Amino acid sequence: MERQGNAPPDDIPIVLAREGHHGPVIHAANRTVRVNGILPGSRVVDMRAICPELQVEFADEAGDHAALDRLVLWARRWCPWTVRDGDDGLILDTTGSDHLLGGEAAMLVEMETQLSLLGLTARLAVAPTWGAAWALARFGPVRSICAAEEVNFKLGALPVTGLRLDDATVLLLRRLGLKTIGAVMDVPRLSLTRRFIKAGLAANPLLRLDQALGKLAEPVASVDAKLRFAVQSRLAEPIFDPTPYLPELCENLCDTLKKAGMGCRRLHLTVYRTDGDVSHVDVATSATTRDPTHLHGLFRDKVERINPGFGFDLITLEAGSVEVMQVLQNRLDGGSDDDLHLTRLVDRLSAKFGPRAITRPVLRESHIPERAAAQVAALANIADVAAVTTQERPLRLFDHPEEVRVLYAVPEGPPAQFVWRRQTHRVTRYAGPERIAPEWWKDRPGTRLRDYFKVEDQSGRRIWLYREGLHEDGRGGDPRWFVHGCFA
Amino acid sequence: MGSLRVQKRLAGQVRQPDPLTHTLSEAFPETATDAAAIGFVLARLPRTDAPILWVQDRLSRKEAGRPYLAGIGTKRPVIMVDVSRAADVLWAMEDGLRCRNLGGVIGEIWGDPPALDFTATKRLALRAEAADVPCWLIRRAASPDLSAARDRWRISAVPSAPHPHDAQAPGAPRWALDLFRSRRSKPGQWVATYDRAQDRLNLAAPIRDRTLATGDGAAGERAAG
């Protein structure tokens, strides 16, 4: 594949050169040059003799690689598993994704269209193996599609260059008279093995042939595929309780994480039951960690939720949300920082009760008592605002103010006697009223003001009582009385 | 810490008690809605700015309300844990006691759940002593049955001290304290006056002079002593 983005006109002979052993050699050439018989790899000075008007530009190989790496990710639009192949190729593992694009032939047309819109010419082929696709894309027919059973037949006609061998080996095979891949296939295996027993992969036609025919595995390793951190423990007998195996699993997992320099924020424990079912338990942490005791502690009480069925014989523990974890030394003496313990505590509590159960009250700027304190996440970094009032406030506040029945109302001041929670309270002393008007910018129209009293009843309990509204304030009937909190 | 010093002085003990480690104490409010126990517990926590872990079960939250930050003061952060069962309260408290950076752990449990048995309190007490973090269990509507708490208090509000400027207003809060069981000091009964301005607990008089509690607490009536 060659970049044609802002290429000069095709009739000017232009080549890209790179540094060779004896002066610059041709890296790539356009069509006019190729028609003249100039091949990549030959020396520029020699080729100037053939084609005097040759224009030479130097190739930007690193830039090409980077562009191709970006294209690898861009090709994820067609299938999830893509990788760069050498200097000029992409390998896409389209298994299971071709039907989404209307079959393999339609998929190739779609790919070629999209790539040409980027200004790229592409030669595409579909084949069951990496090697076969490489050969067919370069030496086969246009948009060739090769099924698994016709690999032998289709590769047989291609030149031996299609086996991804180095130049010396290709020359050797040519000298031996083996011009096509089919000719190499016809040679007895034993002879090839004996001849190339010490050759490496790039110089070994037998290995390359096996790769192309699928006899030798050549998996596609995607570039940014996440490492999977999982450990498992196979049991000889089905058991019902994974607890004794958890510490070892956690330690093994944390070891692998530590070797990779990673930490995890989630753990998935899966047990494979003998009755053909699986059960899961998941835990999460609020900070990245790889501390086995901490992670093990998160499973406390959770493993009981596993339904063991008739027992299970395989336990796997997998780390999720894996992130790079920096090792921080907080203090000179190697001790850990104070915050860390608190995060861990919040972790453990959140793992057990859910993150919404762990909160931190903060003050807000409001005179309405229930708005003056708000609940935020426990480790949220929100500065407290100063209290807006210097008045004494109760230690406890009810979520919903509780209405009381007034027995003896007094025109001014709190009731002399009231019933709260079926108990009669006689007010002996009181302080107040403290009038808190509704916040008109927030409250609905018609919200009544409140007059708060701190009252003390006959047994000494101090209660925060308020009257909602005034007599004849035109916002409802008689004012009602509520208990809103308790003082110490 | 403060309480030990106070107890020692009150009981007239000269002997230095064991190293002053924080431990598990239980407080039984006389009535469920009485915030006197909360006030006493907060007054007894060490004066640091370390966060407090405050665990409440559902019934305590519904019946006795939430801690109100504007009343407690913002001197130290509070981490609230809202759970529904008593077993979860105990779990969270025990977990919190593994963290030495806390200034205190307060748990509120309603009634006498089966989960709160001797073993559970023993675990809490040992954890609290190992971590040296004060741990308070506030038990409403509960009977003081078998427990491993080192100190067990029965706390109720009594009519407050006279207000210095307003005769008909309640003044500084007063609490009747009954230390009915203690590992480390002599049990006793006191009336404590809490000085809010100085955050100080004055144990005014032993409760044997308790003419005060039987009185109606009307304005002008003064505490004995």
Image: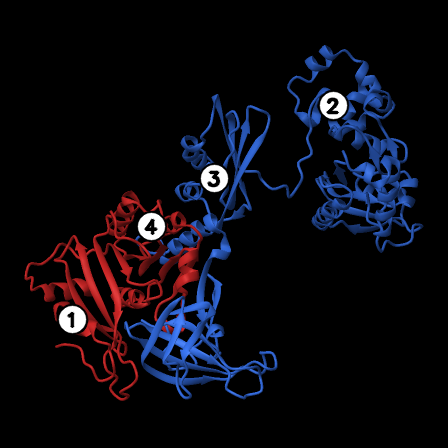
Q: Nearer the viewer, mark 4 or mark 2?
A: 4
Q: Amino acid at mark 3?
A: Lys
- Name the subunit of mark 3: A
- Residue A179 appears in the picture as rendered: no
Q: Quadrant of the N terminus of chain A?
A: top right
Q: CA distance from mark 3 to mark 1?
A: 70 Å
Q: Which residue is mark 3?
A: A259
Q: Say which of A294 and B195 sits in front.
A: B195
CB contact under 8 Å: marks 3 and 2:
no
- Residue A460 appears in the picture as rendered: yes
Count residues near mark 3 (Cα–Cα under 10 Å), then give few for <14, some for 14-19, many for 20+: few
Residue A412 vertical placement versus A309 (above, below): below
Q: CA distance from mark 3 to mark 4?
A: 50 Å
Q: Which residue is mark 2?
A: A214
Q: CA distance from mark 3 to mark 2?
A: 34 Å
Element under disc 3 = helix
Chain letter for blue, please. Answer: A
